[in-house]
Image (spheres, rainbow, N blue to C red):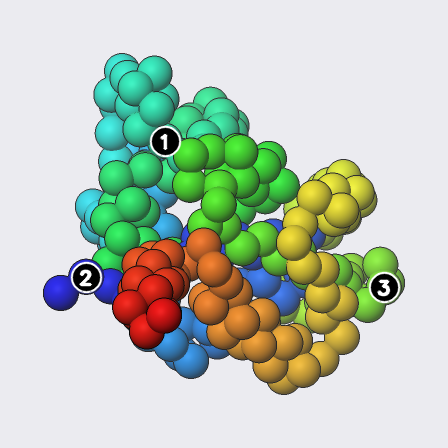
C-alpha cells in the first residue's frame, strides 16, 4: 500500500544556544516516526559511535564520488573533514510518508532547498529573544569554556543574518510555546498539496463522476 502522504524534509537551524537540539528532541518525542537525518563523514569514528547511528563513516574518495554523483543533498568541509546528508535514505523515508529532521546550518539548508527534493522541504529558523539571553544560555548549559563561547557568539550573527531564507522564523522565548508552534507548522505543512500524492487522482475521479452524472 502506498503512503497517504509524502514525508517532509524538516530543516531546523539556529545559532548555538537558541534551543534547536532541545526542540528537535521534543519533536521526536511527539512523533517517534520523525527520523533524524544521519550524516556521512570522512572523520574517524569516536569511541562509542556506531555506523549508521551517529554517522555513516566513509573515506574521502567515496565521499567525493557520492557528491559527484549527486548522492548528497548537502555537504560541507569542516575542520579538515567532509560532512554531508546522503540522498538515498532520505528519498526512501519521504516516499514511505516519514518525515526526516535536519539539524543543519543555513548553508546546508540552502543546498537542500535548492535540490531536487526542495518541493518537500519545510525550513524553520529559531531566533533567541536577545543576544544577551543567547550568551546566558550558552553559559548556563556548561558545555563550553569561555573561548569556545566567544567563538560561538562571533558566529551567531552570521547565522542570524540568513533568517530571511527560511519558510518560518520563530523567536524561542519559551520552549513550551515554541514547541507548540512547531507542531502546528509541521501538522499544517503535512497537508500541503505537494505532500498528498493522491489528490490529483481524486480530483480526476470526481471530474469523471461529475461527467457521468451530466
Give the Cα separation between the discs numbered 3 and 1: 35 Å
Residue 130, numbered label = 3
3 or 1: mark nearer the eye: 1
- Quarter of the image with the C terminus is bottom left
Q: Nearer the viewer, residue 214 or 206?
A: 214
Question: Where does the image place residue 68, in percent across and percent down from the top left?
Answer: 34, 16
Check whether the beta carbons of the residues at disc 3 and disc 2 lie within 8 A of each other: no
Residue 2, numbered label = 2
Give the Cα separation between the discs numbered 3 and 2: 46 Å
Mark 2: secondary structure:
loop
Mark 1: secondary structure:
strand
Residue on which the image places disc 1: 72
User: Can I make out residue 60 in this image?
Assistant: no
Check whether the beta carbons of the residues at disc 3 and disc 1 lie within 8 A of each other: no
Up-down relation of residue 192 to residue 123 (above or below): below
Q: Is residue 117 left or right of residue 135?
A: left
Amino acid at each position: 500500500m502506498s503512503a497517504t502522504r509524502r514525508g517532509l524534509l524538516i530543516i531546523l537551524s539556529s545559532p548555538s544556544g537558541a534551543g534547536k537540539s532541545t526542540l528537535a528532541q521534543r519533536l521526536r518525542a511527539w512523533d517517534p516516526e520523525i527520523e533524524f537525518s544521519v550524516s556521512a563523514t570522512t572523520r574517524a569514528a569516536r569511541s562509542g559511535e556506531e555506523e549508521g547511528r551517529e554517522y555513516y563513516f566513509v573515506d574521502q574518495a567515496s565521499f567525493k564520488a557520492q557528491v559527484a554523483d549527486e548522492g548528497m543533498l548537502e555537504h560541507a568541509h569542516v575542520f579538515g573533514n567532509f560532512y554531508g546528508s546522503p540522498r538515498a535514505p532520505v528519498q526512501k523515508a519521504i516516499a514511505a510518508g516519514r518525515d526526516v529532521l535536519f539539524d543543519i546550518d543555513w548553508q546546508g539548508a540552502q543546498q537542500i532547498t535548492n535540490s531536487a527534493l526542495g518541493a518537500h522541504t519545510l525550513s524553520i529558523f529559531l531566533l533567541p529573544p536577545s543576544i544577551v539571553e543567547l550568551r546566558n544560555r550558552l553559559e548556563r548549559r556548561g558545555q563550553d569554556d569561555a573561548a569556545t563561547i566567544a567563538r560561538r557568539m562571533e558566529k551567531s550573527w552570521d547565522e542570524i543574518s540568513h533568517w530571511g531564507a527560511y519558510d518560518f522564523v520563530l523567536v524561542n522565548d519559551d520552549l513550551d510555546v515554541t514547541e507548540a508552534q512547531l507542531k502546528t507548522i509541521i501538522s499544517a505543512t503535512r497537508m500541503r498539496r505537494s505532500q498528498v500524492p493522491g489528490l490529483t487522482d481524486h480530483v480526476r475521479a470526481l471530474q469523471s463522476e461529475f461527467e457521468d452524472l451530466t
